[in-house]
Amino acid sequence: MPGDLLNTTMPLLVAATEGADEGLSPLVKVVPGLMIWTILAFGVAMLVLKKYAWPPITKMLDERQQLINDSITSAEKTRSEADLLLADYRQRLTEAREQADEIISRARKAAEATKSEATSAGQEKREELVEAARRDIEAETRKALEDIRKEVANLTVLATERVTRKSLTEADQKQLVEEALREVDFSSLAGDRNN
Amino acid sequence: MNRRWYALATWLTVTFGALFAPVSAFASEVEFSPDDEFALPPWIEINIFGIDMSINKAVFYIFLATVLTVAVVSLVARRMKVRPESRSQTTVELAYSLMKDNITDGNLDPKMAARWFPFIGTLFLFIWFSNMVGYIPLPVNTEHTMNIAGLEIPSFALYAATANISMPLVLTFVVWISYHVEGIRAKGLVGYVRGWVPAGVEGFMVGPILVIEVISHLVRLISLSVRLFANILAGHLLLLFMGGGLVILLGLGFVGSTILGLATGVLAVAFFLFEIGIVATLQAFIFCTLTAIYLDGAVAEEH
């Protein structure tokens, strides 16, 4: 069988590659008509492609190139804008923070001032109240002593009448008692209240 | 996505079904000769000034590749958006980037790249579409017909214009002439030819070196064209033999044919994917990259 294979195919292949045999020439025969058709077809294809294929492709690629360039440019622009904006915001943030700190410290000072003011005002008020109270007490004390004095004078007049069965004129008696009482020292009493 | 896979699977099944068809038909003793697959019987006979310009299978494939190149790229290009919305745009952009950035700008200085991109770009697409349509089975084998619903239609076959030496050769001619013209335009005829001799070579050695350089330029005509042609032809021959051709040629009987058919069929699928996935694009890429390199070499200051 291999012999058959060789006998049938080898001459064919050899002839095909050498192309010398007139009988097998279709494989390697140069055909002028075909060459002319090829040139014509190729020429037509080249002209048509030159007119209808390459220009739109080139145009599209140029447009794409332009689009990419534009995109890059606008992206760079956007980015630098963003950078500026960011720096601006950072600065504003810093300023805001400083302002906030200042406000806080000012508020703190104000609070302290208010507090100390309030404290001193309270102190004054208290002192005032204490003073007023003291004055009231002194006035009341004085009044009370006056009352006591009068009461003692009256009682003394009565007591003297009982003892002497004689009555002085009321005016005489009062004058006598008042003179006597003036000599009595009530200061110790008032001093006790004071202390 | 699923629907696409179904479509692909169906297509492959039909393809290889058609290729395997002779396996069941080998008993009918149809004379099968592989080179018939590459024969070019005229479909419409045209003769201009004694040159046979008949429309045949290869011409049809060239037209097909031209129409696809022009239509696909132009239509997608027309609907291109700055923000891609379709996969077709992404694909064309990918191809454009390959042609522009990689092949053209990667090998030529900006001025040369701008001047030669339309040529190199068209060359790439033209060769790529030629290669790719070559892997779509089409009813183009007018030597054999098949009967479908009472209609005699040509058998499905794989063919590629690039699998015929004429097409790569004439493209190579265009490239070859182009780069020489560029070289002469840049340096003048004398300067260009003198540029072939490396700096430092003097005296009696100039002659032989010049001869070698001339030969090397002439060899480029063959190397550039045959690289493309032979790769595509080899792929098609492999697919032809693996996809049933071998089974018919050997005629091993029912059991042997079945075993061989299954084994080669699996290989055929593998080769098919390899050709579509790598060879078709790679060869177009190499052809155009070399074109750019030749153009650059022609105008470069230092050789």
Image (cartoon, coloured by chain):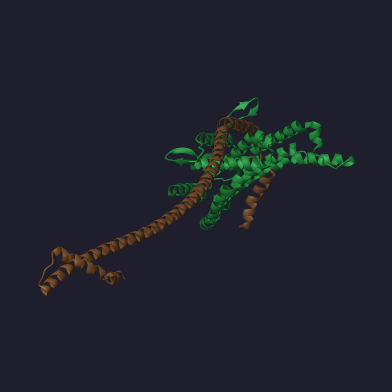
Is residue B50 at least partly visible in the picture?
yes
Q: Residue A174's spot in the image, x, y percent?
A: 17, 65
Residue B28: tell me if it is visible.
Answer: no
Q: Quadrant of residue B195?
A: top right
Q: Is residue B193 left or right of residue B78?
A: right
Position in image of residue A94 (x %, y %):
50, 51
In the image, residue B29 sits, relative to residue B166, either above or below, namely below
Q: Return the residue nearer the eye: B117 or A141.
A: A141
Q: Quadrant of the C terminus of chain B?
A: top right
Q: Is A122 left, or right, of B175 in this rendering?
A: left
Please identify the residue farthest to the top as the structure is shown: B49
Count all numbered tags in the image, as a single digit. Answer: 0
* Residue B66 vertical placement versus B256 (above, below): above
Foreground of the two, B59 or A171: A171
To which quarter of the image does residue A54 belong?
top right
- Kindly give the residue lying farthest to the right in the view shown: B203
Q: Quadrant of residue A43?
A: top right
Say if B34 sits above or below B176 in the image. below
The chain coloured green carries which letter? B
- Work out whether residue B4 or residue B142 is closer to the camera in this orientation and state it: B4
Q: Residue furthest bottom?
A: A163
Chain A, colour shown: brown
Residue name at image x 40 percent, y 59 percent: A116
Residue A115 x/y as whole percent: 39, 58
* Left or right position of B215 against B36: right
Please state the horizontal and vertical placement of residue B233, each as a whole percent of the image.
62, 45
